[in-house]
Amino acid sequence: MDTGGRLIAGSHNRNEFVLINADENARIKSVKELSGQTCQICGDEIEITVDGEPFVACNECAFPVCRPCYEYERREGNQACPQCKTRYKRIKGSPRVEGDEEEDDIDDLDNEFDYDALDPQQVAEAMLGGHLNTGRGFHPNGSGLPAHSEIDSFPPSSQIPLLTYGEEHSEISADHHALIVPPFMGHGNRVHPMPYTDPAVPLQPRPMVPKKDIAVYGYGSVAWKDRMEEWKKWQNEKLQVVKHKGGNDGGNGEELDDADLPMMDEGRQPLSRKLPIPSSKINPYRMIIIIRLAILGLFFHYRLLHPVRDAYGLWLTSVICEIWFAVSWILDQFPKWYPIERETYLDRLSLRYEKEGKLSELASIDVFVSTVDPMKEPPLITANTVLSILAVDYPVDKVACYVSDDGAAMLTFEALSETSEFARKWVPFCKKFNIEPRAPEWYFSQKIDYLKNKVHPAFVRERRAMKREYEEFKVRINGLVSAAQKVPEDGWTMQDGTPWPGNCVRDHPGMIQVFLGHSGVRDVEGNELPHLVYVSREKRPGFEHHKKAGAMNALIRVSSVLSNAPYLLNVDCDHYINNSKALREAMCFMMDPTSGKKVCYVQFPQRFDGIDRHDRYSNRNVVFFDINMKGLDGIQGPIYVGTGCVFRRQALYGFDAPITKKPPGKTCNCLPKWCCCLCCCSRKNKKTKQKKDKTKKSKQREASKQIHALENIEEGISESNTLKSSEASQIKLEKKFGQSPVFVASTLLEDGGIPQNASPASLLSEAIQVISCGYEDKTEWGKEVGWIYGSVTEDILTGFKMHCHGWRSVYCIPKRPAFKGSAPINLSDRLHQVLRWALGSVEIFLSRHCPIWYGYGGGLKWLERFSYINSVVYPWTSIPLLVYCTLPAICLLTGKFIVPEISNYASLIFMALFISIAATGILEMQWGGVGIDDWWRNEQFWVIGGVSSHLFALFQGLLKVLAGVSTSFTVTSKAADDGEFSELYLFKWTSLLIPPTTLLVINIIGVVVGISDAINNGYDSWGPLFGRLFFAFWVIIHLYPFLKGLLGKQDRMPTIILVWSILLASILTLMWVRINPFVSKDGPVLEVCGLNCDD
């Protein structure tokens, strides 16, 4: 869409629409409406059907007759066309008359107001055509007919259905097409020619089969039988040759005459496949899980039947905690029962959708980048993410990048303007030399010998020049950041003196700026560039904006108006595309003809840069991404993790997944006769019910685009519905999607796209409307449509809703990581990140969308539900975990233990339990490809986060949901060091550090006291002490990374942490000493030593 590179701002609610920096001549004006045709009987205007075409009464000659005259002629006249005398056939929506043929399909007159029975494509075209002042018949000359130059511009086969996968085969010449297309015919979807004739252009009928007389066929008839048989024969011959390739004796296969034959066969193969885990790895793993379950049963049988009488409270507390841990383990373990891996075939994708010498048929993708505060999210990082998107290995006309600036910062706007200029040089450089990664900051920071292989002679020279360009680009961006540190009193102004519309962050209009993609803007080599659009949604006081989820929903709507790609990719502003073929990897699943229609999103694992080698705080999260997610992929797919995910737009609109046809069940032939009667009755009821359900859901679940042309022929061209039905359906759609007819119409287009002749003024007006702050009022946005509201972790909720609708997701792990980002590597920032995730889980647990009680009767599988339940229940584990980690210190201070004297039987159970736990972890590491370091860091941080972030998130969520009190925990920087990974040693005070530090101090004190007591009491006290010491050391070892984080690089603990921890530890220690001191309450017991001291 061409906006002349200007910024569009406006507010739909205030009826504002401003094109900044535009003169009067450049302002967009509306266009004329489509003029209609005239009925040759009554002279009235012929109505326009829901597909935007004039009403056609006769299927043979298309003689112009309006619907009232058509119905009157059928009811009262001779029921024949006045021109060709052919009997009128009944058109859906018209009443039946005597002599009509029987029709098995549903009569739309009986379902006139049934929205679900409408063809979404027809409704969408009618709504788009009526609202955007466009139509298939509109042309500037005002005649309703295309100009001769426009006729010449259309390819002759653009509207002719062929029998070769939608392509014209070389053996079928232009004279053999099924339809006669007059030169004055409109290029719409209709089959029948327009009724107008131009005397200046004589009609030259083209013979369909040169050997036969054209009179054999009716004018416009389809002569396809012979061609179909010829096509079948041709295809069979090709397939037979490919099938028997290389099958000669001796193995010396003859070369094929046609070099395209292997390519044709390869292009029909699936675009991806599952790779099950080898049975040598997965079968022992499953056996260990079953054995561990049995051992758990024996363990709890022993624990419950052998209470500790003198420490009953400690015993009961420990058993309750252990039961909770066992339930939590089951919820986490069984979703990993069917782990799989996947493999993609990018070459097959190219063979199928990128034919040489033809336009690419790959689907379009809209990429969403979200940012809020440029001071916390540096513009240079965002710029690198945008540059990696613009340089991706994908057709440029199929990619559109939308940057959401939810802070309405002029710094982000100006940085994006600089980025668009630098992209004109960076994108051709990346594609010319095929470099990886295509984010310049990380590309130039790679420590790789670029001269090791024989490279292009000009590569070194151009790389040096490009690096100088990037350094200058960084200087300009950093200069903008420096200038933005001090905001002027009157706010920011643009270069022409216009005040920046977003000066007030909480009260500003919506803004849209198309930086790249409009006419005239190309790269330095003259090639087209992907679209780059800046979007800042409208914000007004008194409206709920729903943070990131609301911004993403605004991007869904504005992108559907401007580009409407059928697939969406969302990335955080700090996650750049590390693999330029990442979009192609996702399309191997989305566009797979066998299984792609049921895939709602393709999730990529998160990989990170800038993390220390030891990954002290488990920032990489390798266990989750390489073990848990692979397990979910074998059930119904991975959960959505918030970034690096390619969505199907229709799934985000809340539609159900397509129904998979089940094979026919067993007939009654093999059953007794008395059973057949029952089956017949039940079958009739089932058929009636299934027919109603199919009618109800058939149009919500969009029909997939057929690959084989024979299926296209069988489907035929659907007949038009009545305008009244389309209006009724539009009202229902607007209640769901909002009051934008353009956007509502786009939701019904499964393959995406916008009208070619759409008025730019209408599109811009609609784009401003759909990002207005009140657009979502009284709609289903955030409830059933788009990103779901109600939690700070909107990603889990959004993926959960899709799976409940019957969709499945896919986990894609390319050999080269698809995306890379940055992660907080110091302790305080990491704990706050985990706090936000846990808080979102608590909010979901306390909402109506909790997977424990939501989504039954849908398409969610049980093991997938287990995973979602575990994802919202895990913060509650913080309470039993905190108590359990306190028990070792209590046992050491009191001299009691949670287990009685251990017998040989109990020793075997405990040993078997520990061995099964270790074996499960080892086998998981084996089939998941995870190192022992990553696995152990994950176990350690599970304890650290559980006793700190998860605990605070639980109380914060309860206060927020139940009492409406919002609390926050501030992070304050205290000190920093220079050098590599300096942020790792940066200390920031936060109250999250108090609980784990207290646990460390208490357990260390308990160890000291226990050992001292054993030394004083003699040899017999060492035996019971070992169990307590093992328990305490288990806690200390798991908290060891936390201790290192507190000590920092200088091996010293901050004073405030030390003071708080010693204070709390002293209080708890004194309480236990007061309650149960180590000496007898009657004083020390003195015994006679046996020596006479008086002598």
Image (tube, grey):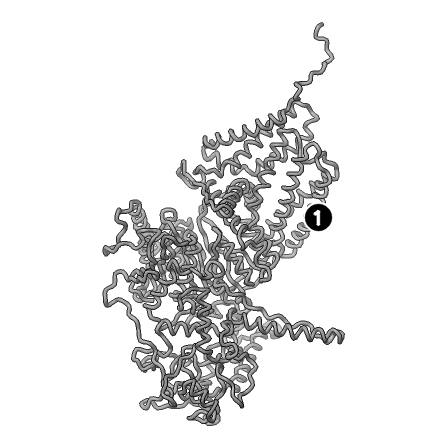
Q: Is residue 798 visible?
A: yes
Q: Count residues near mark 1 (Cα–Cα under 10 Å), then give few for <14, some for 14-19, many for 20+.
A: few
**Three-letter amino acid code at disc 1?**
Ala
Which quadrant of the structure image shows residue 341? bottom right
The residue sitting at 28% across, 54% down in the picture is 500
Q: Is residue 524 left or right of residue 290?
A: left
Location of residue 412 in the rendering, given as x and y in whole percent from the top left corner: 34, 53
The residue sitting at 48% across, 29% down in the picture is 1059
Which quadrant of the structure image shows residue 1026? top right
Judge whether 102 appears above or below 785 on screen: below
Number of disc labels: 1
Judge whether 573 appears above or below 748 on screen: above
Which quadrant of the structure image shows residue 396? bottom left
The residue closer to the viewer here, 542 or 917, is 542
| Residue placed under numbered mark 1 in the picture | 294
Location of residue 497 in the rendering, given as x and y in whole percent from the top left corner: 23, 55
Q: Is residue 581 visible?
A: no
The residue closer to the viewer here, 638 or 1067, is 1067
Judge whether 32 appears above or below 772 on screen: below
In the rendered image, the quadrant that contains the N terminus is bottom left
Q: Is residue 49 left or right of residue 937?
A: left
Label 1 sits on a secondary structure element that is: helix
Location of residue 468 in the rendering, given as x and y in whole percent from the top left corner: 31, 52
Location of residue 306 in the rendering, given as x and y in whole percent from the top left corner: 73, 38
In the rendered image, the quadrant that contains the C terminus is top right
